Image (spheres, rainbow, N blue to C red):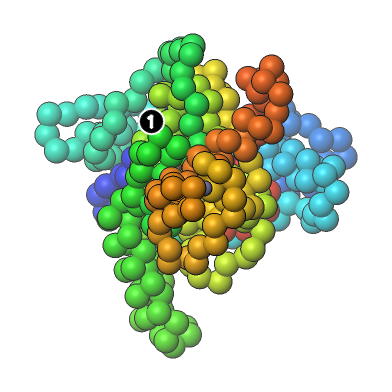
């Protein structure tokens, strides 16, 4: 099992200079390899790899970059190339790989070697990176297993993060005979399930969203090209990052809760619901977070040998889960009150309908073997990098 850990780095001024310098050199090598690739009659990955060695001879200062990090740029180039041809195969109109300007080059990777984690008793732990040094960070979560690679990323806010990918052999235990549950996702209750449990949006996330709206409004009135606008941009970017982190943390816990307690989970199919494009930022973040939640639920369920079924969401709110008749409700009606006597929270009613619908949708023997689909996620980060060429770094 592969796990990604993400930690904020707190480099010293001097280390930050080295990080920026390394980033720039990696970009230089990437662009160099791309230009060499364009000159090649027959594409030859190994030959390009050797060119890095030649280049280092001509430009000895490249020796100051960990050699595996430079080699990784060749890997990155070919990974982009593959992604591009995949898009082409899928009928997408694609251009060619572009040279990367500073704005489009924000990560470099240590593959297999050149790093170490040093745990301290003091406030900061240290991440040692060859040729850069021991960078302070806080290890809020233990890294289990063998580290495969570490990607260093520079965010628009100026912050640095390390994404550590480690591999272990332990899986979520598979348990038989776990219960069934329907989960309704909403804005007031983030999740309400058919057993009556509900989870609110974390308060701090709400707070950050409010703050984002405020700062975004401020950004919109700042004069274009002014240094104040630039500062405000960074402020907004910082809040975006904070929201992404808070949200991911919450979603991991929630999806883990369901995947470890239930064997069969029914959720709304958001593909249909999500077609409506949203003008409101907070709303679009919510939408993205729902599909992210379902995605997490799916992969955690798959590991645990559980089933996730997606149902058509239309009508799940208005229908009575007890007698089946339509009970019209406005958005602000939080209670479902039916003439059959059922009077419960509207989201609770929806959750029961979702479970019902899932159970009705397939014959029993097929229910347990429904393949889990994984949808592409549209996180805040990906929205930002949409204009980039084929993505190559997976970044959780
Ligand atoms: Zn009823």
Q: Is residue 138 rendered to the left or right of residue 263?
A: left
106 lies above or below 368: below
Q: Quadrant of residue 234?
A: bottom left
Image x and y of residue 100, in percent: 62, 56
Which residue carries the number 1 mark?
257
97 lies above or below 371: below
Image x and y of residue 96, in percent: 78, 53
| Residue 201 at least partly seen | yes
Rendered residue at 69%/43% (across/down): 80
Residue in the foreground of this view, choosing between 229 and 309: 309
Rendered residue at 44%/55% (across/down): 337
Q: Residues within 10 Å of mark 1 (few under 14, many from 20)?
A: few
| Residue 229 at least partly seen | no
Image x and y of residue 177, in percent: 48, 13
Instruction: Give the secondary structure at mark 1.
Output: helix
Q: Is mark 1 within 8 Å of ligand 1?
A: no
Residue in the foreground of this view, choosing between 71 and 181: 181
163 lies above or below 260: below
């Amino acid at each position: 099992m592969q796990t990604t850990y993400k930690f904020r780095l707190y480099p010293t001024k001097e280390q930050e200079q080295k990080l920026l310098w390394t980033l720039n050199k990696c970009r230089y090598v990437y662009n160099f390899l791309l230009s060499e690739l364009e000159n090649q009659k027959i594409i030859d990955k190994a030959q390009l790899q050797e060119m890095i060695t030649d280049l280092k001879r001509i430009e000895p200062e490249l020796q100051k970059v960990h050699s595996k990090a430079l080699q990784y740029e060749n890997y990155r180039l070919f990974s982009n190339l593959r992604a591009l041809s995949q898009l082409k195969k899928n009928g997408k109109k694609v251009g060619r790989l572009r040279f990367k300007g500073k704005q489009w080059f924000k990560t470099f990777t240590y593959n297999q070697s050149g790093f170490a984690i040093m745990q301290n008793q003091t406030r900061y732990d240290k991440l040692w990176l060859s040729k850069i040094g021991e960078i302070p960070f806080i290890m809020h979560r233990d890294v289990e297993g063998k580290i495969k690679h570490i990607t260093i990323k520079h965010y628009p806010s100026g912050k640095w993060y390390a994404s550590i990918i480690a591999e272990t052999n332990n899986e979520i235990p598979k348990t038989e005979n776990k219960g069934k549950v329907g989960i309704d996702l909403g804005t007031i209750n983030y999740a309400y399930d058919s057993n009556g449990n509900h989870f609110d949006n974390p308060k701090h996330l709400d707070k950050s969203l409010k703050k984002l709206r405020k700062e975004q409004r401020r950004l919109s009135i700042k004069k274009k090209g002014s240094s104040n606008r630039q500062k405000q941009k960074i402020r907004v970017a910082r809040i975006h990052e904070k929201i992404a982190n808070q949200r991911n943390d919450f979603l991991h816990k929630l999806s883990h809760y369901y995947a470890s307690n239930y064997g069969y989970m029914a959720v709304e199919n958001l593909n249909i619901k999500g077609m409506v494009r949203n003008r409101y930022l907070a709303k679009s973040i919510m939408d993205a977070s729902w599909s992210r939640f379902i995605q997490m639920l799916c992969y955690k369920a798959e590991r645990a040998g559980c089933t996730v079924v997606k149902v058509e969401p239309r009508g799940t709110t208005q229908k009575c889960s007890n007698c089946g008749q339509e009970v019209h409700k406005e958005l602000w009606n939080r209670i479902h009150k039916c003439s059959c006597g059922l009077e419960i929270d509207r989201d609770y009613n929806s959750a029961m309908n979702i479970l019902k619908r899932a159970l009705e949708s397939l014959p029993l023997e097929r229910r347990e073997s429904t393949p889990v689909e994984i949808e592409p996620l549209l996180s805040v980060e990906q929205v930002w990098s949409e204009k980039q060429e084929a993505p190559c770094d997976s970044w959780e």
